[in-house]
Amino acid sequence: MSVRGLTVRFAGLTALDAVDLTVLPGTVHALIGPNGAGKSTTFNVLTGVYRATGGSVRHGDRELTGLPPHRIAEQGIARTFQNLALPAGTTVADTLLLGRHRLTRAGFLASGLRLPSATQEERRHRERVREIAAFVGLERQLDTPTGALPYGQRKLTELARALCLEPGLLLLDEPVAGMTSEERRRTASVIAGIRDSLGISILLVEHDMGVVMRIADTVTVLDFGRLIADGAPHDVQNDPAVLRAYLGEETAS
Ligand SMILES: Nc1ncnc2c1ncn2[C@@H]1O[C@H](COP(=O)(O)OP(=O)(O)OP(=O)(O)O)[C@@H](O)[C@H]1O
């Protein structure tokens, strides 16, 4: 994914100011920065929730700028949310199956009539759902309603649901926020596994620097809507502009 000159203005406030960003295939790319830096705004533009004031977003050779969220999902770009967005009464298996809706061909009418083609297709999707659940470590929770799961497993369900879209690029908004340290460790290794075993590119917004430093290949740092550093985790961590931005945040709070 290639982002060039991305600019977003809200009534007098420049939330993003000419930001460039390239997510290379098969890498974990972290987007970090102090509160209000523009990370969520970037995500919302990349997923079609907000419209950019200027600049362009391309995925491969497709221009995404201005497309609505469902058209962006159709390009193989899946996302998770900062706050959980799961149907509480639905089982993990059915939640993941719904995540495959874009990929189902038989359609609701055929499924409702239980046509053989539809039943076969459903079986195929259920099989894939089982594989994806096993990949993130939720195989034993498939029949549990998502509302009955502990928080960490609900976050993993959301991650698995995004994987059910069979994306080429996955956007993760604070995937370990609110987790225990054990859940963070496990989720970080699941994310690294998504890159290493499934070859999916990942753009990650995350405040947990331990996780970012451990799994990111590249880190982009925003501050007040501007890109202030971009590079390998170790270099970015020691960049004076980055240290100043985070120090400023600590002094302010
Ligand atoms: N819909 C909106 N309308 C007006 N201003 C907005 C809107 N969304 C974000 N902003 C402003 O844009 C700036 C960037 O906010 P954004 O939420 O992208 O930051 P962030 O880096 O995600 O912060 P955090 O880490 O706190 O989530 C902030 O000043 C915010 O108040």
Image (cartoon, rainbow, N blue to C red):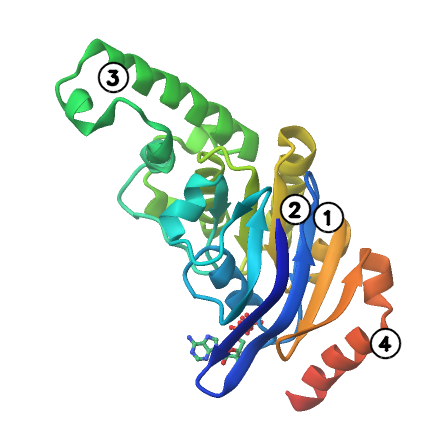
**Residue type, mark 3 in image:** Ala
Q: Outermost residue toward the top?
A: 116
The one nearer the camera, 250 or 179, is: 250
Which of the two discs, 1 and 3, sits closer to the camera?
3
Residue behind mark 1: 215
Whether pointer 2 and pointer 1 mark residues with C-beta atoms closer than 8 Å, the reply is: yes
Q: Is residue 91 left or right of residue 188?
A: left
Whether pointer 4 and pointer 2 mark residues with C-beta atoms closer than 8 Å, the reply is: no
Image spot of residue 213 (x, y percent):
76, 55
Residue behind mark 2: 188
Which of the two discs, 1 and 4, sits closer to the camera?
4
Image spot of residue 142 (x, y percent):
39, 31
C-alpha separation, residue under disc 1 versus residue under disc 3? 40 Å
Which of the two discs, 2 and 3, sits closer to the camera?
3
C-alpha separation, residue under disc 4 versus residue under disc 2? 27 Å
Which of the two discs, 2 and 1, sits closer to the camera?
1
Q: Is residue 227 left or right of residue 180?
A: right
Q: Is residue 140 left or right of residue 113?
A: right
- How packed is label 1: few (under 14 Cα within 10 Å), some, or many (20 or more)? some
Residue behind mark 3: 118
Any mark on residue 240, and which? Answer: 4
Which circle's residue, 1 or 3, is located before the other in the chain? Answer: 3
The one nearer the camera, 161 or 22, is: 22
Which circle's residue, 4 or 2, is located before the other in the chain? Answer: 2
| Residue 150 in sight from this viewpoint | yes
